[in-house]
Image (spheres, rainbow, N blue to C red):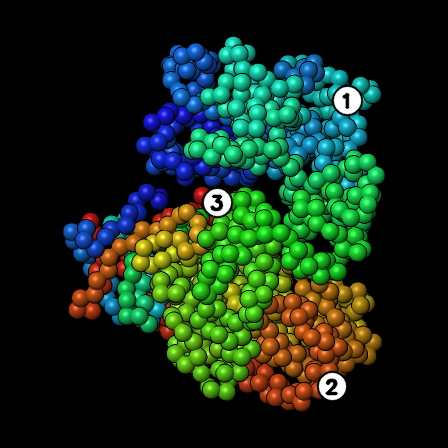
């Protein structure tokens, strides 16, 4: 048995251990790891997340127990100070000695501190370890302003951290642009304006002369004579390899530091390897984690007998979300290849900048930059890496919607050896093979058995595309059936339930499905049953999602929020007082919602029936905030009070909200009525919206805010209220009948063949001849309306389910709240 | 919070604790019971005429919630989905079916004379 000593316990060290143990157990290699920090290896890439919840456990690559379980001895809080190559021993700062057969140097790097006068002043920090962060957090409590020296990747991460600590934040960069190594001037300018919009000030072209202050810093002085006042400074100017062990041990180092290694990752002593940021390969130190993992792989393979696997340098391409802004930089991003031709696209309004660099012969993609929208990163990187032939018009690569054709074609053109998932190193060929090997192909199963898309998730869309393309190539029709238990689309099930008069999930499953159902088909069928029959939801409580099952919205910590209906947003003083009294009695956090009502948070499950009893007594009804159902019809104050108002928008909004309240649909529904074209109710961002005109209303449909905001489209203009209701009835029922599960109206319209023109034909011109039928269906649903809460609290058996424990009356003792301002909030996720 | 929950195999049961009546349970759904300071989720899988018990704690975000999750099957494997982020766990083995690492503890359940019992080690 050979003994492997690993010096350093960072991400690469951990990865080395993980990879080694996956190929060799404790009988082949004894493994001992020395870490200088007191806690085991953690995820430095996501260090800034520590600021939001300050839990190092969450950042750990693996808990201490993992090392034990894998037969790895982990010693933390010990610095290795000496290597005795002759006797194959190392020595720690406390004098212990340890022998080795193979030594792995994974000592990482430290923050580079430029030689500026005053760097030792109080209030100056570096950004590298959890300990650094703790000190930064402690210090930040006493101050208002903080600056970051360095506008590179890490510097901007640090700036986000300071911003999260509520400091007035500045970034100081020596170069004339941000991320000078990855971005060109235009890209950097776009990034700068996006970051500045968040309130972080950016100073470029600033050469710091001195850090000033008496003992504690109070500012920076620049060589151009200007100065910046600040209370603390975080230095993030790059990294320096931790190669202190090299000198005395006679190990060679690279020109910019780091243990010099060959393509086997060996130093000049063949039994001593260096990996990660501690290694210098061809004079280069790689400050990214992916190359470090590759190096670990090379050493593991070599130790376990595969000596052919070499390190051949690494690609510095990167894609990340920087302070909420998507940034991608790949290949020759700056266009430094002689003769290369850049093509760029900029949309200042949307904050998007894209650039691709094409080879002089116009045949290959060399690299590029993406700011604000990096969705095409994976595809473009593959074009670059594989030298794939460009489309006839290379600008198609970065220009908008035509992309889908490129993406599809691109996916097919990729060689099978293409690496799709870089986290788990999965190639396109491996994914295809996994799909073909499965008897009943299942995307989840493919992800699980290949590991593709289970790391950072960036490649998930590509895995999905490969899946669909492979199935198609196998001659399978990709039909959007509900799930493994129902081989029907939602629309088909809608017809079956209606025509065959199916009333329960079990009946539908017995009759038309297989197996026992799952968390996908149960709520989908529950929604269908509710949309068709409008029966009591709680009659079949265990097929509902949690929110529907308890008629309230589950929140962090397992408490619920309660939203009574406030039609049109109109509420009397007495009702306001009633809500206030209930909130006070049950200690609830109250917030005004975007839909003009009041949300009461932090209700314990056991209290829900009592809370609702009081609300109902005060005249309230369920607001269905928990359901895929009509939420609110928002209104501006309209002609009753407003000097611009054309019609009484509030009264009309109340009428519409009361008409459709309780209506269950494939997804939530929101509406609005504006009293004039100033559009204060934001009707054009709703599933349906009405805007008053001189002679009536314009009816807009299929808009929404949310993830992909979309403006509503005009369905009919200058119609009277009665016609508006008629069209709304038809429109809503048509949507409920034909949409896929969990598709908002906007998504549904985008998929609808013929788009808004076809929808107009169906709703206004009644081209399918189903207008009356749709109205009749809607009328039946409206007639069947009941306040779910009113019925629920009168059903004793039902109410007995509203308890955390079924065998004792206690609240959930693990549910914790902490004070916030004058109210409370749930304790953070662990 | 996590360490308290350890799977108990049927052969390890040394005592049974009566917790509820069979009729207290909804069809194809779960309830949470307090057993010696532990929160145990018990599921009545009526469609298959089977009973299961697991820890109530979802290991993903450490929430006491699994008893309120939807149950169903993945192939033949009975499972429960956490209401928070839809992580799914086998009711038989406690294994996470999404391929993540965390798993849950499971407990033996028996029904006798209309009463529901949970097994102790």
Marking on residue A828: 3
Q: Position of residue B23 (x, y in %)?
A: 26, 70
Q: Are marks 2 and 3 on the same chain?
A: yes
Q: Nearer the viewer, residue A306 or A151?
A: A306
Marking on residue A765: 2
Does dot 1 land on a helix, a strand or a loop?
loop
The answer for which chain carries disc 2 is A
Question: Is B104 left or right of B11, judged from the image as shown?
Answer: right
Q: Nearer the viewer, residue A819 or B118?
A: B118
Q: Label 1: how many residues lie within 10 Å, few (<14), some (14-19) or many (20+)? A: some
In which image quadrant can residue A230 be found? top right
> Which residue does the image show at 43% across and 11% down from the upper left?
A86
Visible residue check, residue A12: yes
Marking on residue A207: 1
- Of tags 1 and 3, the one toward the viewer is 1
Q: Are marks 2 and 1 in contact (CB under 8 Å)?
A: no
> Which residue does the image show at 45% across and 17% down from the upper left?
A80
N-terminal of the two: label 2 or label 1?
1
């Amino acid at each position: 048995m050979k003994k492997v000593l690993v010096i350093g316990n960072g991400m690469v060290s951990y990865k080395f251990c993980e990879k080694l143990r996956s190929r060799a157990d404790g009988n082949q290699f004894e493994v001992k790891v020395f870490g200088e920090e007191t806690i085991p290896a953690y995820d430095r890439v996501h260090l800034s997340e520590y600021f939001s919840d300050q839990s190092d456990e969450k950042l750990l690559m693996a808990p201490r127990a993992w090392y034990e379980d894998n037969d790895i001895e982990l010693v933390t809080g010990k610095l290795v100070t000496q290597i005795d190559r002759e006797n194959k021993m190392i020595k720690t700062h406390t004098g212990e000695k340890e022998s080795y057969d193979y030594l792995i140097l994974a000592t990482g790097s430290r923050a580079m501190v430029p030689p500026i006068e005053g760097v030792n002043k109080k209030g100056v920090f570096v950004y590298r370890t959890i300990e650094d962060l703790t000190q930064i957090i402690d210090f930040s409590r006493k101050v208002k302003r903080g600056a970051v020296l360095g506008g590179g990747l890490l510097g901007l991460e640090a700036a986000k951290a300071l911003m999260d600590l509520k400091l007035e934040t500045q970034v100081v960069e020596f170069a004339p642009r941000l991320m000078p190594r990855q971005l060109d001037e235009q890209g950097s300018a776009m990034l700068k304006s996006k970051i500045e919009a968040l309130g972080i000030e950016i100073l470029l072209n600033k050469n710091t002369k001195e850090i000033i202050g008496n003992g504690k810093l109070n500012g920076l002085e620049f060589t151009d004579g200007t100065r910046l006042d600040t209370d603390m400074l975080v230095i993030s100017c790059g990294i320096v390899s931790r190669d202190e062990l090299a000198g005395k041990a006679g190990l060679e180092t690279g020109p910019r530091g780091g243990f010099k290694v060959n393509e086997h990752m060996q130093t000049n002593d063949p039994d001593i390897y260096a990996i990660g940021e501690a290694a210098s390969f061809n004079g280069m130190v790689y400050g990214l984690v992916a190359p470090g993992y590759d190096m670990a792989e090379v050493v593991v393979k070599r130790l376990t007998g595969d000596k052919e696997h070499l390190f051949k340098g690494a690609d510095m391409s990167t894609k990340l979300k920087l302070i909420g802004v998507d940034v991608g930089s790949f290949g020759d991003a700056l266009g430094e290849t002689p003769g290369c031709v850049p093509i760029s696209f900029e949309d200042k309004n949307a904050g998007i900048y894209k650039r691709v660099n094409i080879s002089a012969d116009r045949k290959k993609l060399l690299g590029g930059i993406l700011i604000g929208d990096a969705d095409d990163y994976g595809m473009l990187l593959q074009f670059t890496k594989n030298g794939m032939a460009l489309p006839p018009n290379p600008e198609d690569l970065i220009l908008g919607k035509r992309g889908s054709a490129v993406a599809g074609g691109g996916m097919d053109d990729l060689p099978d050896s293409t690496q799709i998932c870089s986290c788990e190193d999965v190639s396109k060929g491996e994914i295809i093979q996994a799909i073909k090997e499965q008897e009943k192909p299942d995307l989840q199963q493919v992800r699980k058995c290949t590991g593709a898309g289970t790391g950072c998730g960036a490649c998930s869309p590509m895995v999905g595309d490969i899946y669909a393309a492979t199935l198609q190539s196998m001659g399978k029709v990709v039909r959007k059936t509900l799930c493994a238990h129902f081989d029907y689309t939602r629309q088909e099930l809608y017809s079956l339930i209606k025509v065959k008069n199916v009333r329960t999930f079990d009946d539908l499953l017995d009759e038309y499905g297989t197996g026992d159902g799952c968390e996908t088909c149960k709520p989908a069928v529950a929604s269908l049953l509710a949309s068709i029959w409008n029966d009591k939801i709680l009659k079949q409580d265990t097929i509902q999602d949690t929110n529907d099952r308890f008629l309230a919205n589950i929140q962090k910590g397992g408490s619920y929020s309660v939203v009574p209906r406030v039609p049109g947003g109109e509420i009397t003083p007495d009702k306001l007082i009633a809500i206030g009294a209930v909130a006070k009695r049950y200690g609830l956090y109250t917030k005004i919602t975007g839909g003009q009502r009041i949300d009461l948070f932090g209700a314990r499950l056991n209290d829900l029936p009592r809370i609702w009893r009081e609300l109902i007594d005060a005249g309230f009804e369920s607001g269905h905030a928990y359901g895929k159902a009509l939420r609110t019809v928002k209104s501006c104050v309209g002609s009753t009070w407003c000097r611009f108002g054309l019609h009484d928008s509030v009264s009309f909004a109340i009428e519409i909200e009361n008409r459709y309240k309780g209506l269950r649909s494939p997804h939530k529904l929101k509406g609005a009525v504006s009293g004039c074209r100033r559009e204060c109710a934001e009707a054009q961002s709703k599933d349906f919206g009405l805007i008053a005109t001189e002679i009536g209303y314009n009816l807009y449909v299929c808009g929404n805010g949310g993830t992909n905001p979309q403006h509503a489209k005009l369905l009919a203009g200058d119609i009277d209220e009665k016609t508006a209701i008629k069209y709304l009835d038809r429109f809503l029922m048509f949507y409920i009948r034909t949409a896929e599960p969990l598709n908002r109206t906007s998504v549904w319209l985008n998929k609808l063949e013929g788009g808004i023109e076809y929808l107009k034909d169906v709703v206004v011109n009644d081209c399918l001849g189903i207008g009356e039928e749709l109205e009749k269906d809607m009328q039946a649903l409206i007639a069947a309306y009941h306040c779910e809460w009113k019925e629920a609290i009168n059903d004793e058996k039902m109410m007995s389910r509203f308890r955390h424990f079924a065998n004792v009356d206690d609240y959930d003792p693990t549910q914790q709240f902490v004070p916030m301002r004058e109210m409370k909030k749930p304790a953070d996720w662990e | 919070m996590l360490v308290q929950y350890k799977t108990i195999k049927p052969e390890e049961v040394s005592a049974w604790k009566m917790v509820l009546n069979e009729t207290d349970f909804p069809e194809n759904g779960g309830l949470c019971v307090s057993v010696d300071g532990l929160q145990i989720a018990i599921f009545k899988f009526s469609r298959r005429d089977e009973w299961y018990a697991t820890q109530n704690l979802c290991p993903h975000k450490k929430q006491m919630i699994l008893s309120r999750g939807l149950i169903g099957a993945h192939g033949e494997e009975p499972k429960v989905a956490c209401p928070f982020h839809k992580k799914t766990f086998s009711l038989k083995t406690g294994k996470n079916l999404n391929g993540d690492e965390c798993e849950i503890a499971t407990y033996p359940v028996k029904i006798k004379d209309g009463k529901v019992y949970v097994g102790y080690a």
